[in-house]
Amino acid sequence: MKTMLLLASLLSCTLAQVDHFPPGDHLDDHFDFNMAPHRVPRQVKNILVKEARPHIQELSVNTTVISRYAFTAVRCVMLNRHAAAGEGVFRFPVPPGAFVSNFTMIIAGRVYRSRVAPKERRRLKRPGGKARDKESGDPSSEVFRMGTRIPGGERAVFLLEYEELLQRRLGRYEHVTALRPLQLVSRLRVDVTVVDHLPITALEVLPLRRSPARAAAKTDPPVTTTVRREKNACKVTFGPNIIQQAKITTDGILGDFVVRYDVQRDTAVGDVRVQKGHFVHYFAPKDLPAVPKNVVFVIDASASMLGAKIKQTKDALLAILRHLRAVDRFNLISFSNKIKVWRAGGPVPVTPLNIRDAKKFIYALTPSGGSNTDGAIQSASALFRRRLHGVSLVIFLTDGRPTTGESQSAAILGKTRSAALDKFCVFTVGIGADADYKLLERMALENCGATRRIRQGDDASAMLRSFYEEMATPLLSHVRMDYASAHGVTRHLYANYFNGSELVVAGKWGPAEALGVRVTADNHEKKLVLETDVALRRRESEAGELVKAAARSFPESGEALKRLAADLAERVWAFLTLKEELRCRLLARTSREREEHVRRATDLSLAYRFLSPLTNMLVDEVPSDGDEVPDDEEEEGTLREEVDRQSLTLRDQVDRRPAKKSLTISKTSADGDPHFVVDFPLSKTAVCFNINGEPGHVLRLLSDHKFSGVTVNGKLIGTPPPAGSRKRRRTYFSSIAVVADRPRRAYVEVTPTKVILDGADRLVLPCHSSASVESGALSLAIVGGRNVTLRIGARVALVVLLHLYKNPAPYQRDHLGFYIQDSEGLSPGCHGLLGQFLHQEVSVVEGEAGDRPSSALLKVRGRSVPVVRKSRRIYGGAHSVDCWFAGNNGAKVVDGRYEDYVASHMFDTGDGSNA
């Protein structure tokens, strides 16, 4: 006989989600139905003897995180020790952002498996009342709850699976396992395996956390925690025995087991994973200058805020004031029956005087009266009447519902949309059980913001500070992510990008050799463009290597890693697409539009077995000879991909194209060991010489600070001579520094690995990624792994070649070559090892320097120098130039002595002002 149970859906208004029970996984692989009752230590037997409910013999939670997408499988075994049948209730807190995808029960040997079905149009009364279990003691998660009768002396086995995409906040990913079984467990174990295509950094296991916002007194990981770590993978295990659990707590609410980490990013454009026709793009740029923000705090001061709520709110606001940046502007509004605006003129600068006065305003907040939500939002909007530079935010905090003024949610939302349109984003915070969370969520969704719920008993002050810190440093606004040769792309338009966060976009790619990725955004008063081409087929052929390596490191998890990685990109795409459809359903303006999003979301939920707000989960008994789900073929997932070409553009003009790889060939240069070449076009000749410098010395290459404002210096690095060679040690340029003093001073430093631009803003760009930056009269273009071109105004262009070795010999070092592409903007007074020749001409009289036919006499700047004919290879050997070579370390060719060209530091312009 088949029994059907309507599972009490978790998540009444939040999205809970996960993956299905893995194909080909059999129940007896997970459960030992003949397991003997576990022996309970005498020290804690008095705690368990009073339990009338079934005893939890085993609770194991196994999480596998692959490229930030987490699969979690929970296994719980209960034993009814009594002769009579008893009620067994399986409860497990699920993260609010997760989707449950599978649930299975085995009761006295009978198997029940779940399936996802559409919700009925009419609202059904759910068995067992509310989906949320108030007994759980968990204030931050939704609780999956299933009750069943367990025959006397029998066991019940519960298997729950869910999955989630980890969110990056404050520069860290955080995976949370909520351990609240409400009793001591005979065998408790948590395993968290993390595998990422980028190196894992900042790995830490936090102390057990009883509240999501309260920091634990201890900083050490929980007792029995073990960590095994590789470069791209780690495994964390926590398994306290029943005595160790009792030392932590006797109520069975251990708290949250938290694993926190980040990854090492190299490319500004982000990293793209491809697999079986799907792609996932992770975007978290770094080293960008912060954008100024204008923030208005709108605080509920109604009577319901009396007591701990207003005190914690004041504490949080005072702490936030201390962390406002000097470039920010801020204001405060309190509302009850009346609206009080601290500074009616708009957001004000962060100054000691304004901070002092703002503190007085906060201290004076006295709760009374009702809540005029609409009046508060409209007052905040009035503060943004004039357009302000930077990102504008309204942080709205309340603990109740609108009671005065406009009280209809639809009208409040409509007026808020009109007020905020293209002017500011609204971030909402609800405190306690009485807040109108539907209104707050909708208000944030419709106005490019986010919402945060603070439940009763939470540390509101800490949670408010944490919420603010997430948006404290905006880096980009108006972010747009486009993909050539792609379709089915998830949400790709974002109002803002905040430091420490991450934007993730997934999609499908068609028949193409490469996926073109283009990201555009605003960075204060500049335009940012990031581009890359991802070689699809070639990179997909390299898939699975990372998972194979992790499986070798952690063989006990090897099969699970390979199985879960097999369709990883597709599941991330489905997860994000379902999230977006549910979001659009809430934002829909018409019933027809809403129905279309409901249909799409329901179809996705059914196709991927996600328990969403639009579906129920039904549990069917599997007959003893029931049809088993056929095994799917296991395939290795694609976890590796490389980018062939990347380009980043920070510029003022939107239509400016990225830098090209081709270069105009210039002979005037300092490259190699270092070999100097000077081209004299009017004389139709070239002169070359060597400079045998000392490692660590900084040589002046161009010195025109007084006239054009341009200075170029190069720092030498030394290497030993090749084995068996008579040559002296070699020196190369390890870094090139450029100072441009017109119209305002800017500094550029190029090394083989990065380019640092320090002017009005500071940027650090990797040399292996193509990029271009334009700001005022200064423009910089990188062709990844090849060269860097710097243009100063319209008539000065300098090129730095990157010489990189994959497997360098002891006498080889990554180094740089310097080329002058355009010197028209440099003055006749320019000097330096190269600069002194830019406006000079020479003559060569052949045969006067000796008997050799290749010798001659060079006449330069009134001096005569013996020279011989040579051929020099430039541009990494790609081109050659015939030149007249002057030996003796360039003596008489250059003015003065070697010591005259040694600068005191990289940015020494020779005028003494920046020594």
Image (tube, helix red, strand yellow):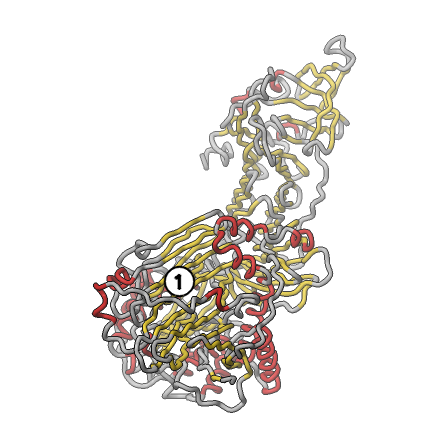
The structure residue drawn at horizontal position 48% and vertical position 86%, both measured from the top left corner, is 410
- Left/right placement of residue 884 relative to residue 742 reads right
**Observer-nearest of 247 and 525:** 247
- Left/right placement of residue 165 relative to residue 345 reads right
**Which quadrant of the figure contains the C terminus?**
top left
Task: Point out residue 770 in the picture as x, y percentages from the top left corner.
Answer: 63, 48
Q: How many marks?
A: 1
The structure residue drawn at horizontal position 27% and vertical position 65%, both measured from the top left corner, is 40
Image quadrant in which you'd find residue 91: bottom left
**Observer-nearest of 631 and 624:** 624
**Amino acid identity at mark 1:** Glu
Task: Point out residue 706 in the picture as x, y percentages from the top left corner.
Answer: 55, 36
Describe the element under mark 1 as helix, strand or loop.
Answer: helix
Task: Point out residue 711 in the picture as x, y percentages from the top left corner.
Answer: 56, 36
Q: Is residue 307 above or below residue 192?
A: below
Task: Point out residue 616 in the picture as x, y percentages from the top left corner.
Answer: 51, 81
Q: Is residue 375 above or below residue 732?
A: below
Q: Residue 239, can we see it? A: yes
The residue most toward the bottom is 122
Q: Residue 395, can we see it? A: no
- Left/right placement of residue 666 relative to residue 355 reads right
**Observer-nearest of 84 and 682:** 84
Q: Residues within 10 Å of mark 1 (few under 14, many from 20)?
A: some
Image quadrant in which you'd find residue 250: bottom left
Q: Which residue is mark 1?
A: 469
**Observer-nearest of 883 and 77:** 77
